[in-house]
């Protein structure tokens, strides 16, 4: 039975990760969801753009592999630039979420968007013609 659940869990992981991730970008860029808009250095603005649009693309399953690869790299950079200098352990340096997102997106890069995604829809159409 668990093998039969794999496509459902993959799609659920992609949808939830994208839904949660875009909110971080919206909070950085526009102060949505309880965030506060502040003057950003260019790098932080760039991160907000990737989080917002990358999260929406992953949520919908559009170019999932490449968007997930970009988001995974962003989270790895965020971890090592912003969190790791504050200490080794992720729980102590505040980097647990960045590390988790990094590996969730790395998994989506390897597995793709799943059947219930725009990528999956396009693949089915291409296969049926």
Image (cartoon, rainbow, N blue to C red):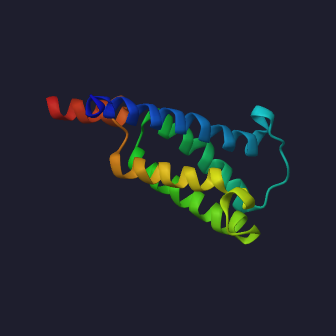
In the picture provided, is 111 more to the left or to the right than 100? left
Residue 69: quarter of image? bottom left
Image height of 98 relative to 119, above or below? below
Q: In the depicted view, which residue is nearer to us: 97 or 54?
A: 97
Image height of 33 relative to 103, above or below? above
In the picture provided, is 126 more to the left or to the right than 59? left
Q: Residue 104 in the image: state x and y as whole percent.
A: 48, 48
In the picture provided, is 23 more to the left or to the right than 11? right
Question: On the rendered image, what quadrant is the N terminus found in?
Answer: top left
Question: On the rendered image, what quadrant is the C terminus found in?
Answer: top left
Q: Residue 125 in the image: state x and y as whole percent.
A: 22, 30
In the picture provided, is 105 more to the left or to the right than 78? left
Tally of marks: 0
Residue name at image x 35 percent, y 44 percent: 112
Q: Residue 86 in the image: state x and y as whole percent.
A: 76, 68
Which residue lies most toward the bottom here?
85
Q: Residue 23 in the image: state x and y as whole percent.
A: 66, 37
Residue 114: quarter of image? top left
Q: In the depicted view, which residue is nearer to us: 1 or 112?
A: 1
Q: In the depicted view, which residue is nearer to us: 8 or 43?
A: 8
Residue name at image x 40 percent, y 51 percent: 109
Residue name at image x 59 percent, y 50 percent: 50
Residue name at image x 39 percent, y 33 percent: 9
């Amino acid at each position: 039975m668990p093998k039969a659940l794999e496509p459902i869990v993959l799609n659920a992981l992609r949808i939830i990760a994208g839904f949660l991730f875009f909110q971080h970008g919206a909070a950085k860029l526009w102060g949505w969801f309880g965030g506060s808009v502040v003057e950003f250095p260019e790098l932080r603005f760039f991160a907000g753009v990737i989080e917002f649009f990358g999260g929406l693309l992953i949520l919908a399953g559009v170019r999932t592999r490449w968007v997930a690869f970009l988001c995974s790299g962003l989270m790895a950079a965020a971890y090592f630039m912003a969190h790791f200098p504050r200490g080794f352990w992720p729980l102590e340096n505040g980097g647990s979420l960045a590390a988790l997102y990094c590996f969730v997106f790395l998994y989506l890069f390897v597995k793709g968007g799943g059947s219930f995604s725009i990528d999956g829809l396009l693949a089915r159409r291409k296969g049926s013609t």
